[in-house]
Amino acid sequence: MAPRPLLSLKKEDGTGDIIIFSIRFGSMQVFVRRNYRLPRFDAYVEWEAAGYLTYEIQDGILDIQHTVVKPELRGNGIGEALLEAAVKYAEKNNLKIKPTCSYAAKKLSPNGEMASGTCCPLQPPK
């Protein structure tokens, strides 16, 4: 298992919402921002769209619905970066996570590489 990359928070607004951060996977720099027009996080590699994660918030639960990465960029940590953004956003806003998306469900499972304490019985990410 590859070591987890370090998260570098670049900018926050007054409410603590993640606006943009960057994360490095090998030689690839992935930038993720929360899209304020749509309920999703957008990922960019070299400032070109690389993927997105959609979600819905209802009754204090952030439901991760879809994680999409361009086929030619899959396997480079972009999905993980998007999921990391959603987890951080949920933590900062005291939301529980419901991983409807199969990718998120796999990664947020106790046997996955990432876990969150925002929904039973998972542990917070390190």
Image (cartoon, grey):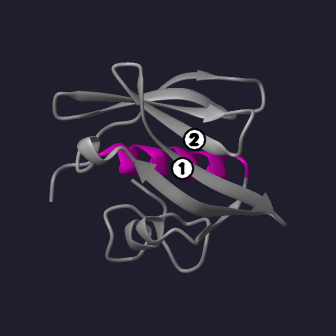
The question of residue 117 being in magenta is answered with: no
Q: Where is residue 107 drawn, in percent x and y?
A: 38, 66
- Residue 84 relative to residue 86: left or right: left
Q: Mark 1 = which residue? A: 53
Q: Residues within 10 Å of mark 1 (few under 14, many from 20)?
A: many
Q: Magenta part mainly helix, strand or loop?
A: helix
Q: Residue furthest right?
A: 59
Q: Mark 2 = which residue? A: 41
- Mark on residue 8? none
Is residue 23 positioned above or below 53 on the image?
above
Do tag 1 and tag 2 residues touch (Cβ < 8 Å)? yes
Q: Residue furthest front?
A: 71
Say which of 75 and 81 sits in front.
75
* Quadrant assignment, res 50: top left
* Residues drawn in magenta: 77-93
Q: Residues within 10 Å of mark 2 (few under 14, many from 20)?
A: many
Residue at 23% across, 50% down: 75
Quadrant where the N terminus sits is: bottom left
- Residue 29 relative to residue 48: left or right: left
